[in-house]
Amino acid sequence: MTSGLHILVVSDVSPAHIGGGGERVLWEQASRLVKLGHEVRILSRSPADEAKERVERQGVRIRHFHSDQRSLLRFVRSSILQSRRTAAQELDEAGADVLHLHQPLSGYGVLHSPPGRRIPSLYTFHSPAPLEYRLRRGMTGHHRGGWTGSLAMAVLWLIEGTCLRRATRIHVLSDFSTGLLWKLYRIPSRRIVKIPGGADTDRFQPAEDRTAIRNNLGFATGRPLLFTLRNLEARMGLDTLIQSMAILRRQAPQTLLLIGGAGSLRNDLESLTASLDLNEHVRFLGFVPDEHLPLYYQAADFFILPTRELEGFGLVTVEALACGTPVLGTPVGGTPEILRPLRSDLLFSGMEPDALAHLILEHHNRFCSDPTGYQDLRLSCRRHALERYAWPPLVKSLEQVFREVTAARFPPDP
C-alpha cells in the first residue's frame, strides 16, 4: 500500500472563509487529499484580524499568519516575512514531503525559508500577479496607479518570477495559462502540468424542482432568468452585460438579470442600470454566500460570463454546467477551452453589447420554441461537467503529480 504524503499548502488566501474561486480550489484539493489518506496542512494569511491562528476542519489543519495592512510596502514585506517565519516553524515542527504554493507573496517567503529551499514544490499559477494588480487598481488602498502602482507591479514581477523559477514544477488550470507563463516569464511547457479546476458535482447538480427553487428565491417562474457571479470590477465586463440588457429588453422584455458579487464598481454599475431604465430588469444580489450558490445556478435559465480580460479558468463556469445550466461566455482566456468542446455556439462572437444581446436572444428564442432541445442542452452541460470537471479524478491527478515531484521523476531542468 502506498503511504500517504505530508503536504504543506501555502497560500495568500484562507479556506477558513470561502470568498471566491481561489479559496474554493484550495479547499477542494486539500480536503479531498485528506480523504485519500494524505496529511494536509495549510499555511495562509489570516482572512481577518479576528481569525484564529489555528483551525482544524475535516482533518485539514489551517495555520494563519498576520500581515501589516497599514501601507502597501508594509503589507508586501510582512506577508513575505511572516510566511517565511511561520513556515520555518511549521516545517521544523512537523516537516513535509512536498510544498504546494498558491500565490507569490507567501510562496516567496516559504521558498526562501531555510527548510523550504530543501523540499520539492509545486506552484499553482492561478493568474499573473502583476497583471491582476494592474486590473484591480482602485479596488483597495493597496491597488494604486502612478509611480507607486508601477513600482508595485515591478516588485510583483520579480517575486512571482522567482517563485516560478524556484518551484520544482508549475501547475496550471488551462492552456491559456500555459501560454501566459511562456509569454510573461519564458517558462517552458516541460516544467508545467495542467489539471483544470473542478466542481463538486454532488453539491452542484440539477434541481429536482426548479420552480420550487425560483419560488423560494422570490423570482417569477415564467420570467427568463439570467445569472452572473463576478467581482464588481472593470475586467469582469459587467457594464457591457448591463448595456446588452438595454438591447435585449426590446425583444425579450420579461428577461431578468441577477448580478451576484461585491466590488468597488457597485455604485457605478447601479447608476448605469438606472440611467438605462433597467431597474426592473437588472437586480444586484450583493455577495452570495457559498452555501447559497447552487440555488442561483439551478434557478437560472442561463449563466452569463462577460469577462473582458484575464479569465484564467472560470470555476463558476464549470459549477454552473454541473447544475445543468448553460453558460454563455466571452471568448476570453480559458473560457473557450471549457465551452467549445461542449458547443461552440455558447461563445459570444465578441465583447460588445450587441454581440452579447444577439447570442442571449438567439438562445432565449430557441429555448422558448424548442423546450425539448433546451432540456437536451441542460443534460449535455451536466454530462460535460461530470466527464471533465468532477473533482475526484482531478485530485487523483494532483496526487500523482505530488508523488512524481517527491520522487524526482520529472527530468531535471538543464
Image (cartoon, helix red, strand yellow):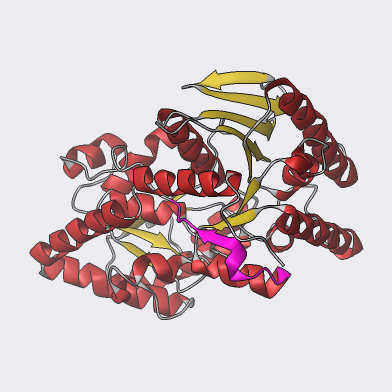
Give 80 or 352, whichever is nearer the viewer: 80
Residue 250 visible to an observer of this rendering: no
- Rendered residue at 54%/45% (across/down): 402
Q: How many marks?
A: 0
Q: Residue 287's spot in the image, x, y percent?
A: 51, 40
| Percent position of residue 295, x then y | 31, 40
Q: Is residue 303 visible?
A: yes
Q: Is residue 356 left or right of residue 408?
A: left
Q: Is residue 280 left or right of residue 273?
A: left
Q: Is residue 385 above or below residue 328?
A: above
- The quadrant in which the N terminus is found is top left
Quadrant of residue 223 within the rendered picture: bottom left
* Picture quadrant where residue 392 is located: top left
Residue displayed at 30% across by 54% down: 385
Q: Give the answer, above or below, for where 75 lies relative to 338.
A: above
Residue 368, position as x, y percentages in the image: 15, 66
Considering depth in this image, is 27 or 257 the residue closer to the camera?
27
Report the span colored magenta. 185-197
